[in-house]
Amino acid sequence: MRANTAMLSLLFKLCLIQVSHQLCQQSTHGKALSFYIGILFRDTETRLTHTLRKDVAQMIMSAPESEVKDCIFNKYVDINVKDDLQIQTLGWTNIQEGIKTAVENEADEGKSLSVLIGPFYVNIAMIAEQMDVPYIVTDYKGFDWIDVNRVRNNVTWKTLLEMKPPANQVNMAVVDVMTAYGLKIAVVVKPDDATSDQECDDLLAQMMDNNISPISYSLEISNEDKMATQASELLRTAQMLNIKTVVVCSPREYRHNLTGIILNRARTFGMLSDETRIFILLDTDFYLSSLSESSIYRNKYYAARCQLLAFRYLDVVQDFPSPTKAIADDVSRLLIEALKNYMTIEGKQSDIDSKLFLESLKKVSFDGKTGRIQFDAISGARVNFTLHLYRHGGGEDIITRIGEWSPETNAEGVRFKKLNESEPHRKGTKNLFDGIQRVAVVLEAPFVMLKDDSTLEGNSRYEGFTIDLLEELSKRCGFEYEIYHVTEYGSPIGGGMWNGMVGEVIAGNATFGMGAISITSSREKDVDFSLGVMTTGVNLLISKPKVMDSIFQFMEPFSLKLWMAIVGASVGVSLLYFSLDYSSEERKFSARETWWFSIGTLLMRGTDFAPRPSSQRILTAGFLFFVLITVSSYTANMAAFLTTNNLEKQIQSLEELVDSPEFECGTVRSSATMNFFKTSDNKIYRAAWKKMSQGGLVASSQEGRERVKREKYAFIFDYMINSYSELTTCETKMVGTPFRLQEHGVVMKQGAPFKTNININLLKVKESPVMAQLKNKWWENKRKCDLMESQPTVEFGIKHMAGVFIVGAAGLVCAILFFLVKKWFVHVKNKEKSTGPDTGTKETIYSPDKNISKEDIANAVSV
């Protein structure tokens, strides 16, 4: 809203500067010409779209007297209809005194108004006529429902000029259209508001006078949810009654949004896809925000097969930023043109003569923002205007002019004229492209790439998805082009300036900017974008994990803790066997035999003896079951571990990347992705920005991919670009679900006349097989890598069993060492005995040990 006000102020200021030196001549008395403008307003009115005060008053105020030195143009008087005129409480009795008081307080003493601007109040019209002050009416009714509105008031006021076409004539145009198309019955939707529906009541009356049956529904405008519910009910009723025509009468569309609610509800019932249905959309402000070009694309009304009909002021579609902007612009020009006329009158005085100035106003005629501006010399009503009927969506162009209406009948005795439907007057699409169009691109695989052939020149040097799409659009839209490349997509550099592709388009060096450029709100403030070319997102590109070979791979089926638990269980069972057998007379489980029994059982080898006591047998059964499950689990897991590559651990998401101290991350400097992280309030994204700002930013995606291959670096960038890298660079892979969903678009200058043509043909390309073919050509068909090669089945080789051989060799070495140590120990002992002193005792093989039987001695002797 502030931007609209500033724009209007600048416009009026320029207009005043342009004519000041021509108009502001001195009067016949040699004094500067005084010109005072009174502007009606209400202090509770805060929205710019609800009042004309700021639209006109601030423009007049912005013209400094130094630039209009001979004229006092910029004297304006705010007149509060509630406090100054007290219409609500006193009616008409204080109006004249209130106007005089406001002039004295805000202007020079003893001066009077030259003109009064604002909405219609019948009491003000009466007083203005008594004061001979021209009253330029900008709306059919006042700010509050406290007076008779102009729709019902048919009095001819001598000093009144109406900026809007009369409401009854606008309604007459709708009735004439229905008559021309043979429509005899219609559902009429209007607001349930006595302050806003007088135009709609007049429409209903005219429909009945012309034998058209209206079924009227009033929507409660105080609650949007209730409005939507009521809209659904009335549309369901229209379907049940098979009524094909719906008339939406919304005199304050900018406030009530009846049109948008009805169309959105109608889409849910499939009514927009019905070719037999007709929606006639009436806004006496002609502020058709729901049918603006951007709204039509956003809400997909371009696909509507029904008839969406609405009148507009001009035969060239213009969307106004507010419902008062067009009126404000025309009022400003009207005053300037009237002053031109006034300056030519002989005998003009330093104070504006109201009667002469009124004559000057009524003589003005020009083609303004609201069509032809011309007034009836007696009544001051708008005359000789034309309303243009447009069909929205469902055609070659989204906004097509199909008819025109004027209040005067033509030679055939009709007011509404259908245009030739075989050659309709469309929103301009012919001769949109003059000469060769320059297209700025950024080298980004696979969107735009340079061919390897250095002998090529011009457009033939480039290839890629964007180049093929550009060629397709040029054929469909009918233009020739010249490609050149820049280094960046575009980021703000201060003072409203941009660099890169966006800057080239703003400066006029390029007609289009194409490639992997994201549609962002910051960019759309200064350039226009087409519809999205393709939907994409942002994800991570990392290096593929390396194979981790280990000669002790046979240990990996079990974790270290599990191995320790198995060894601990074996030791525990050994101790338990030793304890249970310790007091037995036939002791079998000595310390050495107990340990060997546990190890042998665990290795599924067994021993030469078995426990006999019941307690030991129960323990053995439990231990054997433990061994069975352990060995079976190890065997099953070992098959997988020994026949697949073991890969190093990798990050799988942005959260893991932020928490990983091993990985760096980054994105392209000055890109939309960088700005997203830099300005985000999300905790994870802020942490990622902090990490990437510490040396992680790169100049291009190519540099980012090279860092991924060389380092532990995660490149955060466009999903489609990372996808191409994964398919063609086998050292890299994508991880993580794409986030920050976005679309690529075609960049154009703001207000580009060919935007609609580009959008329509881009939609045709997307709906045809061409888009899928281009994606396959530049992504899937460029595949060089197998995406499943990160977990291949490998051949079982010596490297997988090397650790087993080492363990076996270690056991062999230990056994040999133990054998040699024992032999050495026995040899040393025997040597000590043989060299000891002779005691004279006779050597005998008989032992006095009572535990050795005679049979043992005999056996020993025989051996």
Image: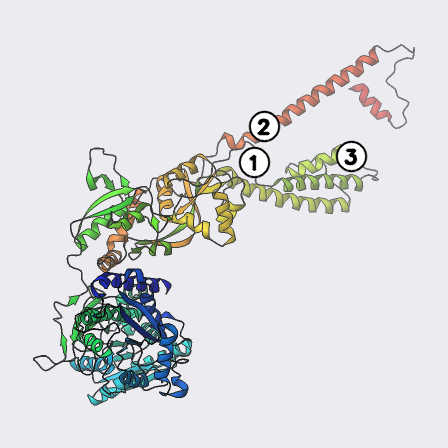
Residue type at mark 3?
Ser
SS at mark 1 in the image: helix
Q: Earlier in the sequence, mark 2 or mark 1?
A: 1
- Disc 2 + disc 1, Cβ < 8 Å: no
Residue under pointer 3? 590
Q: Marks 2 and 3, Cα distance to the nearest angstrom?
A: 30 Å
- Camera-near label (3 vs 1) is 1
Residue 74, quarter of the rendered image: bottom left
Residue of label 1: 554
Q: Position of residue 730 (x, y in %)?
A: 38, 38
Lower sequence index among marks 2 and 3: 3
Residue ID for mark 2: 806
- Whether 755 is drawn above or below 655: the answer is below
Note whether residue 737 is visible.
no
- Sequence-first tag of 3 and 1: 1
From what the image shows, is residue 511 above or below residue 228?
above
Indicate the position of residue 523 as horizontal and vertical percent values. Answer: 35, 53
User: How far apart, in angstroms, are the residues tagged by discs 2 and 1?
Assistant: 11 Å
